[in-house]
Image (cartoon, rainbow, N blue to C red):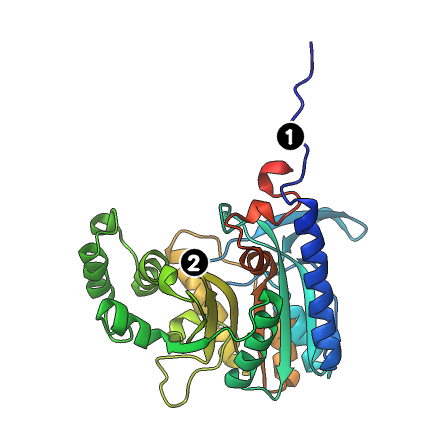
């Protein structure tokens, strides 16, 4: 009987693969010119972030010292390890690496993806957004591309005529129903669930068309690791970058208070339990690093696969990854 031969070819063409290599070279040149140190951190760890919207891919080590097995998690970001480096005095650092998320696959998602993450001691979000824009405009090859800044609350007010910082879950559900989001009448979600649905279903596609668009000052409830705005504690010093309706980057001024961070982790695990999700082990190493002293800094994660899609005007992540989920 003849064996069935699967399509063994990569999703990304050789031309796209060369474009990726050129992009990575340009990234390293960008940071070398600014004396930002490239670092590497583990992809596997004994803990994982507690954010309810992110589910981990799990693994297990069996070997010396762990005959019964040790649970490990593939990281969705190198953030916790990089903050430990910052607390140890590394200065400005960046990393190009793989990241992992369970349950996410499609036109814009693959469970294994490539990110660029960097941290700038002494920077505020405004300075970091300037640097993000400079890098992204260069990598897109779009000199002179306009850059727009819009707060999260301003976006909801202008596009949906709703005060997203004061509206409760019931009011946000009414907005979803009014905009004919299928099944909104029967969904039961908390306030952030409705905000995420409205953002993802109605607002994101309107952002960054013909420009880079930074959405700033996210609700404090959506900023697990960011500093709260002292002038408006309903919001945090967090931003996301959009281009052609797609989120490319997520950044913020980093929370440095160990006690507050531990409280946020516990709160998020309570939310996970309430939603029927498994609570995540808290990273005690990160808490220890914060207790020892994290320098005031801002950091950002940028999706390299999506950026390459944007630069080449491609519409499916399979076209820029050699071997996406359907090819492994």
Q: Position of residue 244 (x, y in %)?
A: 44, 61
Q: Quadrant of the N terminus?
A: top right
At 24% across and 51% down in the image, what residue appears?
Answer: 184
On screen, residue 313 versus residue 81, left or right, reads left
Number of marks? 2
What residue would you read off at disc 2? 272
Indicate the secondary structure of the residue bearing disc 1: loop
For the question of whether residue 258 can be seen, the reply is: no
Q: Earlier in the sequence, mark 1 or mark 2?
A: 1
What residue would you read off at disc 1? 7
Foreground residue, 246 or 297?
246
Q: 239 above or below 309?
A: below
Indicate the secondary structure of the residue bearing disc 2: helix
Q: Position of residue 98 (x, y in %)?
A: 66, 57
Foreground residue, 59 or 158?
158
Q: Residues within 10 Å of mark 1 (few under 14, many from 20)?
A: few
At 75% across and 70% down in the image, what residue appears?
Answer: 39
Q: Position of residue 219 (x, y in %)?
A: 37, 74
């Amino acid at each position: 009987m003849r064996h069935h031969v699967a399509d063994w070819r990569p999703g990304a063409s050789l031309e796209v693969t060369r474009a990726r290599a050129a992009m990575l070279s340009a990234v390293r040149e960008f940071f070398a010119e600014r004396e930002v140190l490239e670092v590497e951190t583990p992809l596997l760890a004994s803990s994982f972030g507690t954010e309810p919207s992110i589910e981990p891919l799990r693994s297990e080590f069996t070997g010396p010292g762990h005959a019964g097995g040790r649970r490990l998690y593939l990281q969705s970001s190198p953030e916790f390890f990089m903050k430990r480096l910052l607390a140890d005095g590394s200065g400005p650092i960046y990393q190009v690496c793989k990241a992992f998320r369970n349950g996410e696959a499609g036109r814009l998602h693959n469970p294994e993806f490539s990110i660029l993450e960097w941290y700038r001691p002494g920077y505020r979000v405004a300075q970091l957004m300037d640097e993000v824009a400079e890098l992204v405009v260069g990598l897109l090859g779009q000199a002179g591309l306009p850059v727009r800044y819009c707060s999260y609350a301003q976006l909801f007010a202008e596009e949906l005529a709703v005060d997203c910082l004061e509206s409760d879950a019931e009011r946000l559900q009414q907005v979803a129903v009014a905009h004919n989001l299928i099944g909104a009448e029967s969904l039961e979600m908390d306030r952030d669930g409705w905000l995420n649905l409205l953002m993802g279903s109605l607002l994101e596609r309107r952002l960054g068309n013909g420009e880079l668009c930074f959405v700033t000052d996210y609700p404090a409830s959506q900023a697990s690791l960011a500093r709260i705005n002292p002038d408006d504690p309903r919001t945090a010093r967090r931003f996301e970058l959009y281009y052609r309706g797609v989120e490319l980057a997520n950044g913020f001024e980093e929370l440095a208070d160990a006690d507050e961070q531990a409280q946020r982790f516990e709160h998020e695990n309570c939310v996970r339990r309430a939603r029927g999700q498994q609570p995540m082990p808290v990273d005690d190493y990160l808490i220890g690093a914060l207790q020892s002293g994290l320098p005031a800094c801002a950091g950002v994660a940028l999706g390299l696969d999506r950026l390459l899609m944007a630069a080449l005007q491609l519409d499916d992540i399979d076209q820029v990854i050699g071997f996406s989920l359907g090819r492994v």
